[in-house]
Image (cartoon, rainbow, N blue to C red):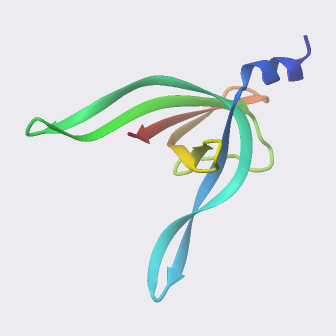
Amino acid sequence: MSSTRQHRKRYRDRVTLQEPTDTNSFGEITQTWVDAQPVVCKITGTGGGERLKGGTVVDATTTSIIEMRYRHDNMPGPKWRAVQYDSTGTAARTFNVDRVQRLNEKEIRLFCTEDV
């Protein structure tokens, strides 16, 4: 089986990688997100946790690994995010990229957290 076919079978999820950019409006700097590229990938949940305060959940996160083909043109980095949209085009999940691992010349892994 060719390498391209293997990746098609393995990568069944789609996300849009976004990079942060600072905009200056009326003397204030605001961080916004710019779509960098849509990618086909594999999303694997790796765990999660909750932070309690007074018996109430105040912060819940999950961790995930996003595997995708290595891109020579626009390599994602920490502080980027990956957004997965639902069938209506609404952002369903947002993964904050914490670390990027280049596996080889063909694949990278994004280690992400997601607020839930």
Q: Could you say where residue 44 lies in the image, as x and y percent from the top left?
A: 55, 24
Image x and y of residue 89, in percent: 64, 50
The relative height of residue 41 versus residue 72 in the rendered view (above or below) is: above
Left or right: 86, with 70 as reference point: left
Q: Which residue is at a point 62% across and 53% down the rendered structure image? A: 18
For the N terminus, give its image quadrant.
top right
The single residue placed furthest to the left in the displayed view is: 54
Please count the marks in the image.
0
Instruction: Name the residue furthest right.
Output: 2
Tell me what residue is drawn at x 56 percent, y 50 percent.
80
- The residue lying furthest to the top in this view is 1
- Residue found at x 49% / y 24%: 45
Could you tell whether 52 is left or right of 16 in the image? left
Q: Looking at the image, is 42 positioned above or below residue 81?
A: above
Is residue 33 shown above or below 10? Answer: below
Q: To which quarter of the image does residue 2 belong?
A: top right
Most extreme residue toward the bottom is 26
- Tell me residue 46's x, y (percent): 46, 22
Quadrant where the C terminus lies?
top left
Q: Residue at x 79, y 30 (%)?
A: 105
Quadrant of residue 61 within the rendered picture:
top left
- Residue 104 located left or right of residue 34: right
| Residue 23 in picture, x, y percent from top left | 55, 76
95 sits to left or right of 115: right
